[in-house]
Image (cartoon, grey):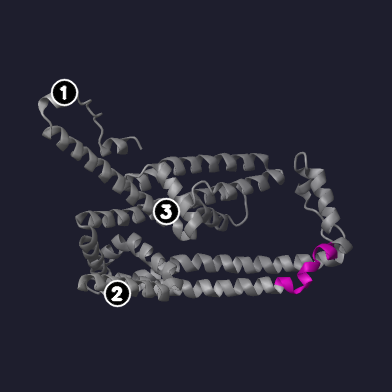
Amino acid sequence: METKARVIGGFILLLLGSWVLHSFLALLVWAVVLAITTWPIYQRLLACNEVQGKVTWGALLLTLLIGAIILVPLAYGLSRLLDEAQSLGQILTEAQHVGLPPPVWLETIPVIGQWAKDTWMNALGNPVVANESLHWLGTGAAITYTKNFASQLLHRFFGFLLTLLVLFFVYQHGTGLSQYVLATNRKLFGETGVRYAIHATAAVRATVNGLVLVGLGEGLLLGVGYAFAGLSHPAMLGALTGVFAMIPFAAKLIFGACALVLVAEGHMAAGSSLFVFGVVVILLADNYVRPRLIGGAVKLPFIWTLLGIFGGLENFGLLGLFLGPTLMAVLMSIWRDWVADMGESDTTTEDALPQEEMIEIEPLPNASPTEFDDGQ
């Protein structure tokens, strides 16, 4: 009775704690994902002579480094966005006075070039229609959008700072926390639970490596392609491509749009070459490199990795990119254990039967979980 009351009381306290922290659960999970992914780097950092034995300084250094890696490109992109917004504002102001002529390349688009030019002239070609089309900018809608954007930006910034703070404490106490987690899994599920926890950790690390590292590699290669194709701001386009490339096959949206712009401007060879180069990079990365990094590390077939990524993205947002494949890897591990247990049970049953009865039993196919792995 006392044990039952303790379980019920602990469960109630767990629900209350989750309710108190529910607004920050996503940030906490992000911190844990970052800590799991970068833990080998943290261990190597602590092994250096300069920070050997200085856990706090090592945790602080790596936390600041991760913050800089994420914040510096975002700050640069935001500054460029503000500059472009100012330029756009000047263009729209001029359009309300003299109209906005169509770009030269618009008429060169095959099939729809003349229609696109006429549509542009009807919408922005002279001051009267330009004022009518851009009238919404003079209302409070633009101000409202700007305020909402600033509010969301400030909210995300403080959320990121909280994530870094939690990450710092996870680095500091990571060894003890991992021991508590493993001890809890051993208490609740036995040694199998410990193995599943280790498997989930490996799945998180493999997923991040497969998504982030491959995405950054694609962005770097395509950034070089943008530079050779003559596009402006190739570094920013490459960074944007790298972010989109973390989602399988999404990078095609960026380099495909860039190739279309080049073709529309009359650079047919550059646009076609960029598109072919991008397709080759994406095919090699998404069909060969990424499956080996993710599926090879946790023995997860790529189709389940892909479904986990898309399903996690739909249900959990950006965080689901890493949670989805992790859940699929743990489920696959449970399924393999179940198949192995069933095979052992069948073998034990056959050994216990008399020889006459065993003759009538149709032999099972010689299958094992490792054969499923070979077929991935």
Residue on which disc 2 sits: 9
Q: Quadrant of the C terminus?
A: top left
Which mark is on residue 242? none
Tell me if residue 133 is in the magenta stretch. yes
Which label lies toward us, 2 or 3? Answer: 2
- Identify which residue is drawn at 75% across, 43% down: 109
User: Range of the magenta residues?
Assistant: 130-142
Precedes in sequence: disc 1 or disc 3: 3
Frontmost of labels 1 and 3 is 1
Task: Name the spot of residue 290 as percent of width and height, x first.
Answer: 41, 46
Label 1 amino acid?
Ile
User: Is 77 on the left-hand or right-hand side of 36?
Assistant: right
Mark 3 lies on residue: 324
Q: Position of residue 118 (x, y in %)?
A: 84, 49
**SS at mark 3?**
helix
State the separation of the CA atoms marked 1 and 3. 46 Å
**Does dot 1 land on a helix, a strand or a loop?**
helix
Label 2: how many Cα within 10 Å (few below 14, some 14–19, many 20+): few
Q: Is residue 193 above or below residue 249?
A: below
Callout 2 amino acid? Gly
Residue drawn at x 42%, y 53% is 324
**Residue type, mark 3 in image:** Gly
Question: Could you tell me residue 79's position as x and y percent?
Answer: 59, 69
Say which mark, if any, is on residue 359. 1
Q: Earlier in the sequence, mark 2 or mark 3?
A: 2
Which is nearer the N-term, disc 2 or disc 1? 2
